[in-house]
Image: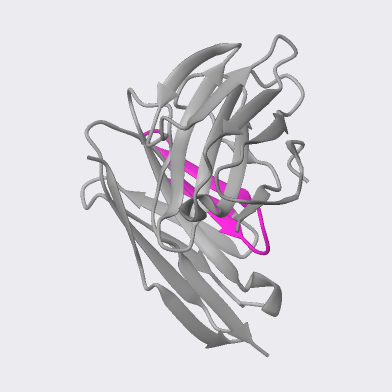
Amino acid sequence: DSGVTQTPKHLITATGQRVTLRCSPRSGDLSVYWYQQSLDQGLQFLIQYYNGEERAKGNILERFSAQQFPDLHSELNLSSLELGDSALYFCASSGASGPSYEQYFGPGTRLTVT
Amino acid sequence: EDKVVQSPLSLVVHEGDTVTLNCSYEVTNFRSLLWYKQEKKAPTFLFMLTSSGIEKKSGRLSSILDKKELSSILNITATQTGDSAIYLCAVRDQGAQKLVFGQGTRLTINP
């Protein structure tokens, strides 16, 4: 158990809908990262927050957004969902913003868009 | 653009064998290379290698970073069925916060 929690574990929804994925980092970790894992793309970085502020952005679609709250939990919002958004969404956390720190991954949320 | 390539993509061996997994990378300014093991769901952290720590060992697993060849290997000795998993290699450069992952090596250990 990495100490990173994610809810829900599974989510099934229809195209065009909007969903929110939630992540709580390990105790004391200030950085939260979101990744998407699909069969054809592998693990892709989406976005990072550090202590409430956006720190880095990857291949995140405009239909997706995220935020980190004062209690350091983070939410990833996915809207106008398409079939291609079906994937595993992971949250990871690390102790600081710098590149020396390893990231610990949560169990993931499996999103299925029908 | 940063790039990570792992080989082989798939490997099947018998219990007790020794395996070597490969990872090569291209990054603008290398900072660290990380190995993860992914079984059913979440990747679990194995090792982090940096310029100041190019060799790591934990039990039957060990990893070496070759900065000259821009590559790393992950060795697993005396393999067990519980080692069956996808092994992911990722790199981070000096400026970026993100990890760039390779496509992974699917390792299957047969009894």
Question: Is residue B49 one of those drawn in magenta?
Answer: yes
Q: Is residue B11 left or right of residue A111?
A: left
What is the magenta range?
Answer: B34-57
Seen in the picture, residue B104 relative to B32 is either above or below; the reply is below
Residue in the picture at 52% in, 78% down: B18
Observer-nearest of A62 and A17:
A17
Residue B72, percent from left and from top: 36, 55
Q: Is residue B39 left or right of residue B6?
A: right
- Any part of residue A102 in sight: no
Residue in the picture at 60% in, 43% down: A90
Magenta stretch prevailing secondary structure: strand
Q: Is residue A45 left or right of residue A114?
A: left
Residue A62, percent from left and from top: 41, 30
Residue B68, percent from left and from top: 21, 47
Question: Is residue B60 one of those drawn in magenta?
Answer: no
- Any part of residue A84 in sight: yes
Residue in the picture at 76% in, 43% down: A8
Badge count: 0
Residue A97, percent from left and from top: 51, 19
Task: Tell me the quarter of the image containing the C terminus of chain A.
Answer: bottom right
Color encoding of the figure: one colour
Observer-nearest of A68 and B53:
A68
Observer-nearest of A67 and A35:
A67
